[in-house]
Amino acid sequence: MRDAYIVSAVRTPGCRRGKGALAQTRPEKLIVQAINAAIEKAGIDKGAVDDFMLGCAFPEAEQGLNLGRIAVQIARFPDSVTGATVNRFCASGLEAIAQSAMRVMAGWSEVCMAGGLESMSTVPMGGNLPRPLPDWAKEQPDVYISMGITAENVANRYKISRQMQDEFAYHSQMKAADAQKNKLFTEILSTVADRFVEKPDGNIVRETFVQDFDDGVRADTTIEGLGKLKPAFAANGSVTAGNASQTTDGAAACIIMSEAALSKYGVKPLAKLIAYTTAGCKADEMGVGPAYAIPKLLKLTGKNINDIGLFEINEAFASQAIYCAQQLGIGDKKEWAIDSQSKRINITGGAIALGHPLGCTGSKLAATLIANMRRKGVKYGVESMCIGGGMGAAALFELCE
Ligand SMILES: CC(C)(COP(=O)(O)OP(=O)(O)OC[C@H]1O[C@@H](n2cnc3c(N)ncnc32)[C@H](O)[C@@H]1OP(=O)(O)O)[C@@H](O)C(=O)NCCC(=O)NCCS
């Protein structure tokens, strides 16, 4: 099989659903800016791209009608560039990268584009009109339950205390705030956003502005403050707005090429996608997914957990992120605390601070992971996340010198 090289990887900022900077911007505008920036960074013509695979967790309404194809048309790619939309919930953006890379690896394409998108302000989590199958919902309601309840189940079953969750959340916020302060998010593209403003004469006009930072980061977070928040999903629960991922708007994209295309276009690669896998688990504790997917990935690639220099493990909830790290043998605080010299997990913060724009997350985390691998000179990086319905996904990236 051939190698698949990632030559550019960018993301918009992640901004808070409803209250954040991207809330009034149509999702199409977000993904179009991401793919245009990915192409520009790669330094190739739009016509060189064979296909665009877009990950989206709720591909309906404004995000529907096969936005994968519509986006390349809005972005004025030639008609020859095809597009599709893929849904694996929170892994959609990574699934898109994997499917595009596999196409290059198989020799079916020379250049592909992959990305992820979710405007949670525009299409709510669960979709506009959820219609579970009634008989199945009675027999097996777990595939339809709230993600917050699955996080409570993980906390209760595996004894992940409120205190542990809040401490992990605090460190996520501190790492993200520190990374913002030190301008480490080099993968962020300054994004043109819309807002609707009422003028003194009563007219509502659309204004544009540029957003270039993740607006959910709370640098003033304290463990005491987190401890005062009420449970968000269960009366006596431990999962709160402070130790859960934020609901977020965002888009991300990358360009993937064969070795022949690297030579043809004179492009230098950033990283290689070595392998991607998925693993199933119980739906009512879907957060444990990475604890199955990462070992499966390591076995597949003949790697050991200590071969991996950096991890991006999506913080859907602190409870599941902690449990997965524990199961992987990397649960110790030294692996994720801001003040640890040997931290490997989510070193610039995770979704608790930076947000989790569902279908975008897989692509967004790849862009962040690759940026961090390059900055730190780390050879192997793993990205992983849990997935609603009871799954985990994981991918291994190798740095290109
Ligand atoms: C938990 C959840 C319901 C909270 O939603 P929300 O109420 O809109 O959350 P917000 O981020 O607006 O926070 C609410 C309040 O909590 C408090 N808060 C949140 N984070 C805090 C922190 N780090 N420190 C102190 N207070 C905090 C604030 O008072 C905040 O209000 P403010 O924004 O007006 O200051 C929502 O984030 C959620 O559903 N998350 C999980 C998403 C999910 O399931 N994704 C899929 C995973 S598989």
Image: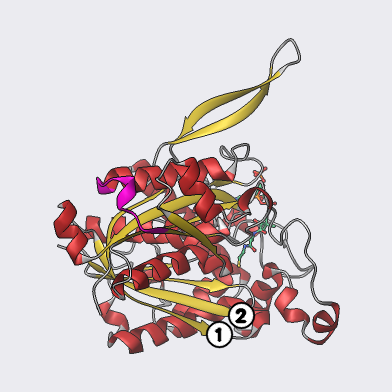
Q: Quadrant of residue 191?
A: top left
Task: Quadrant for the N terminus, please.
Answer: bottom left
On the image, the x and y values in percent for residue 122 come to 66, 46
Asked which quadrant contains residue 183, the reply is: top left
Which residue is rendered at x = 63% and y = 80% of the image? 285
Q: Earlier in the sequence, mark 1 or mark 2?
A: 1
Q: Dot 2, how many residues are within 10 Å of its Cα: few (below 14), some (14-19), or many (20+)?
A: many
Q: Amino acid at mark 1?
A: Gly
| In this view, 300 is above or below 270 | below
Percent x, y for residue 206?
A: 62, 24
The quarter of the rendered structure image containing the C terminus is bottom left
Q: Nearer the viewer, residue 155 or 270?
A: 270
**46 drawn magenta:** yes
Residue hosting label 2: 390
| For the residues bearing labels 1 and 2, Cβ distance under 8 angstroms | yes
Residue 93 percent across, percent down from the top left: 48, 62
In the image, is residue 34 above or below residue 141?
above
Residue type at mark 2: give it.
Gly
Q: Which residue is mark 1?
A: 280
Region in magenta = 42-51
From the viewer's perspective, tell me whether residue 201 is left or right of residue 345.
right
Image point (29%, 73%), residue name: 105
Q: From what the image shows, is residue 101 above or below residue 177?
A: below
* Pick the front one: 130 or 104: 104
